[in-house]
Amino acid sequence: AQKVTQAQTEISVVEKEDVTLDCVYETRDTTYYLFWYKQPPSGELVFLIRRNSFDEQNEISGRYSWNFQKSTSSFNFTITASQVVDSAVYFCALSEAKIYSYDKVIFGPGTSLSVIP
Amino acid sequence: NAGVMQNPRHLVRRRGQEARLRCSPMKGHSHVYWYRQLPEEGLKFMVYLQKENIIDESGMPKERFSAEFPKEGPSILRIQQVVRGDSAAYFCASSPQTSSGNNEQFFGPGTRLTVL
């Protein structure tokens, strides 16, 4: 069975601090996708990143970076020099990759990040 | 190319009324997924549809909920005789039909249902 765990329910940091959001996943499949989404107070889902299971390279995009470790089934997300606009709920998610089929996305419970000015 | 569209964005219903949520997938997308986000929770899969077919409804409550995706027009999620526990954000996602296994889902802005 697939499962995504985000152990941190809520995190508060002071502006300009770095913060890492943890994500641990479970799947029996060898091919899968991992995602991070941001949900700001306005409520929409903002896509941040998708990573397939064969690509373990870490990725950096501006102040955001992601650390994918297959050995520990983790896909952690770090925000460097956090800003107030980063305050949101962040969801880690998992989807299998099946050819000629479909994949429901399994979401973690989310981590609520508050960045205090 | 417009993204996934959902309407209404906010819907208020009284207990016992019906709620109809609409989702227009991205152009060229023939797969639609509905997810529900209860307050303070993550999104949970409800149902997956292709044109005129329900493929997987394993996440749908057994009663009062139904979904369709007709040949023409948007996908509809219908909730009959709403109760307060149905208050949630309902997200629709769509994906293209590809042969690569790369069925990335694109999410709409969600419909926030409030049951009074």
Image (cartoon, coloured by chain):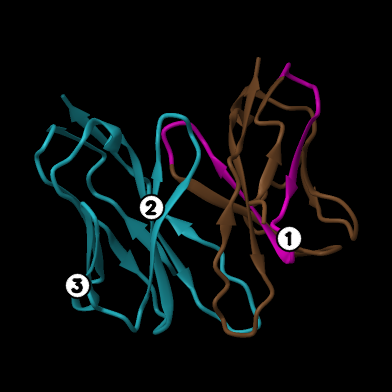
Q: Give the residue pinned by disc 1.
A: B27
* Discs 2, 3 touching: Cβ within 8 Å: no
Say the numbered circle drawn on residue A72: 3
Asked which quadrant contains residue A16, the reply is: top left
Which SS class for mark 2?
loop
Asked which quadrant contains residue A70, the reply is: bottom left
Chain designation of label 1: B
Q: What is the three-letter code of the residue carrying label 3?
A: Thr
* Range covered by the magenta-colored residues: B13-41
Reply above or below: A6 against B64: below
Reply above or below: B27 against B24: below
Q: What is the three-letter code of the residue carrying label 2?
A: Gly
| Count of numbered marks | 3
Q: Position of residue A115 (x, y in %)?
A: 20, 31
Indicate which disc, 2 or 3, sits on the residue closer to the N terminus: 3
Please tell me which residue lies in front, A21 or B109. B109
Q: Alpha-carbon distance for marks 1 and 3?
A: 39 Å
Which SS class for mark 1?
loop
Q: What is chain B's hue in the picture?
A: brown
